[in-house]
Image (cartoon, grey):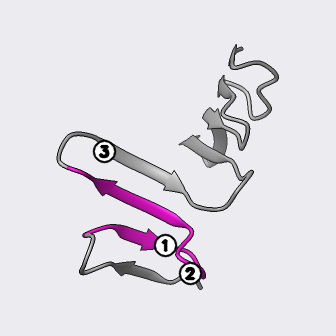
Amino acid sequence: MADIKIDSDSGKFKAGADQDLEVYNDGSHSYIKNTVDDQTIVLATSTGGATTTAVTVDGSNRVGIGTATPSHLLDVE
């Protein structure tokens, strides 16, 4: 089971065994941050029990909309 905590010093929500996912607001911007190098962040939806990748940001900062494997800086399917 993943560990979840709120860092009392920074106010960051952290999740994962190594707290490698952070969600926070710095007063100007909101962030969803993967702190592990070369890892992917996926925003997904679920319809009728099937999970569909909506947006992917990979470890090379390529963004895919409608694709889990973007091959360009912006890859729209």
Mark 3 or mark 1, whichever is nearer to me: 3
For residue 15, which numbered disc appears in the image? 1
| Circle 2 SS class | loop
On screen, residue 65 above or below 46: above
Of labels 3 and 1, earlier in sequence is 1
Give the residues in magenta.
Answer: 11-26
Which is nearer the eye, 76 or 6? Answer: 6
Amino acid tagged 1: Ala
Quadrant location of the C terminus? top right
Query: Which residue corresponds to the image point at 32% horizontal and 78% vertical from the top-left?
Result: 7
| 41 vs 56: above or below | below
Q: Position of residue 42 (x, y in %)?
A: 61, 44
Q: Amino acid at mark 3?
A: Ser
* Mark 1 Cα shell of 10 Å, populated few (<14), some (14-19), many (≥20): some
Q: Which mark is first along the chain, 2 or 1? A: 2
* Callout 3 touching callout 1 (CB < 8 Å): no
Pointer 2 local density, CA inside 10 Å: few below 14, some 14–19, many at least 20: few
Q: Is residue 52 magenta?
A: no
Q: Is residue 43 left or right of residue 38?
A: left
Residue at image location 76% in from the left, 26% down from the top: 70
Front label number (2 vs 3)? 3
* Left or right of 38 on screen, residue 74: left
Q: Kindly state the secondary structure of the residue where label 1 is placed.
A: strand
- The tag on residue 30 is 3
1 or 10: nearer the viewer: 10
Task: Name the residue that disc number 2 marks.
Answer: 2
Left or right: 23 with respect to 38? Answer: left
Mark 3–mark 1 distance (CA, rounded to whole Å): 16 Å
